Image: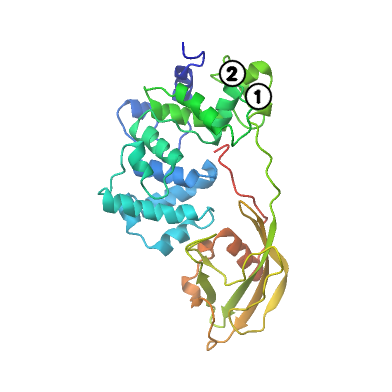
Amino acid sequence: MRDAVDPLAILEWYDRNARPMPWRISPADRRAGVLPDPYRIWMSEVMLQQTTVAAVKEYFLRFTKRWPTVIDLAAAKDADVMGEWAGLGYYARARNLLKCARAVADEHSGVFPTTHDELLKLPGIGPYTAAAISSIAYDLPETVLDGNVERVMSRLYDIHTPLPAAKPELMTVAQALTPVARPGDYAQAVMDLGATICTPKNPACGICPWREPCKARIAGTHLELPKKTPKKPKPIRRGIAYVARRVDGAYLLETRPEKGLLGGMLGWPGSEWIEDDPQDVAPIKAEWKTLNAEARHTFTHFHLRLVVKTALVPMDRAAKVGSFVEQSDFRPSDLPTVMRKAFDLASGGAKIKNKTPLRSKTR
C-alpha cells in the first residue's frame, strides 16, 4: 500500500474549490474535453515565479490581449515587452520570455513541445516550469514542486529537514503522490491547497481534505514547517540616479545593459551600485540638485539606496550617456520600480514605500 494519503480526496476538493484564474481551465470544462493553451500556461508560470497571483493577473491579461499567441509575442519589439513587464520584477524573466517565444516560433512552428525533456531545451525553462507545462497543459504525470507544494508536503509527511536542503526529499514524496489520472488538475489542486488552506500562518486544518493523514498535524508540528536555513543579512548598496529634464520636457534615459539587474530596461543614467560611496559622475553638464530623500528598493540579494539628483538642461546640451526621450513618448509606467521611485521623488510625488519582492509561497 503506497500511503494513507489519497490523491482522490484533493481532486474532489479541487472540483468544488478551484480558484478561477484567467489562464486556468475549470475542472468541469477540462473533464468536458476543453484543453488549456500551453502558451497561456507557460506565460502564467513564468510570471508567477517569485510573485503572487494577485500581482500577476493584470499583467497576464494585458500581455495576452496585446500578444494573444506565442507567434505574436515572438514578433514583438524587445522594448515593448520590457515596458509591459515593468513593475513585475525579476527582469531576467522578461528577457527569457522573449527568447523562449522566439525559439518556439522559429524551431517548433509556434507549438510548445509536449515532453518535459524537450521543454527543458527552451530558453528560460527550468525543471519546475517544464513540469508545470507538461502537467497542466498536456496532462502528463509530471510533479510540480513550488513553494506551496513544498509546504504541503513538509507538513503532510512531517519533514523537518530545512529548505533548500529538503527539496530532494520533498520531491520524492510529491512524486509518489502524483496520480496518472488528472495530473494537471492534481498539480493545481495541491498549489491551491497551499495558497488557501495550508497557508504559512494560521492554516485552516479543520477543512483540509488531507487533515486525517497529515503527520505534522498529528504531531502538533505543522506550524513549525517547513523549516528553512536562516538567511544571511542583506548588504546595503548605494548609488546615484540622475534625472535630467530638457526645457522642452524630454527626459534623459538610458537602456541598461542586457546582462545584470534590470537588464534591457529603461532607466536613469547613474553610478554603479556598490557598498561604498558611489562615484559622482553626471551624464550631462548641468547644475545638479540633490534631493533630500532617497529612492529605496530591495532586490533579492541586497538593499539599494539611491541618491536622486535632478537638473533642467537647455536644448543644445549634449549628453555623455543615454539619449533624450520626448515627453510624449515617455511613460513612467515603463520604468522598473526602483527607477519609478526615483522619478516620483524627482517630480515631487509622494515617496513610494519600499517593498520587498513578493514570494511565491502563497501564490
**Can you see residue 183?**
yes
Other residues around mark 1 within 10 Å, as few (<14) / some (14–19) / many (≥20): many
- Disc 1 to disc 2, C-alpha distance: 9 Å
Quarter of the image for the C terminus: give it.
top right
Quadrant of the rendered structure where residue 340 is? bottom right
* Left or right, residue 265 beside residue 353: left
Q: Which mark is residue 222?
A: 1
> Of the residues under marks 1 and 2, which one precedes in the sequence?
2
Q: Give the number of callouts.
A: 2
From where the camera sits, is residue 192 visible?
Answer: no
Q: Is residue 251 left or right of residue 307?
A: left
Q: Residue at x 46, y 60 (%)?
A: 82
Q: Nearer the viewer, residue 239 or 86?
A: 239
Q: Which residue is mark 2?
A: 214
Q: Position of residue 79 (x, y in %)?
A: 43, 64
**Closest to the observer: 62 or 234?**
234
In the image shown, does 339 or 19 lie closer to the viewer? Answer: 339
Amino acid bearing label 2: Cys
Q: Are marks 1 and 2 in contact (CB under 8 Å)?
A: yes
Which residue is farthest top? 1
Q: Amino acid at mark 1?
A: His
Residue 46 image position (x, y, % from top left): 45, 46
Residue 265 image position (x, y, % from top left): 50, 63
Q: Residue furthest right?
A: 292
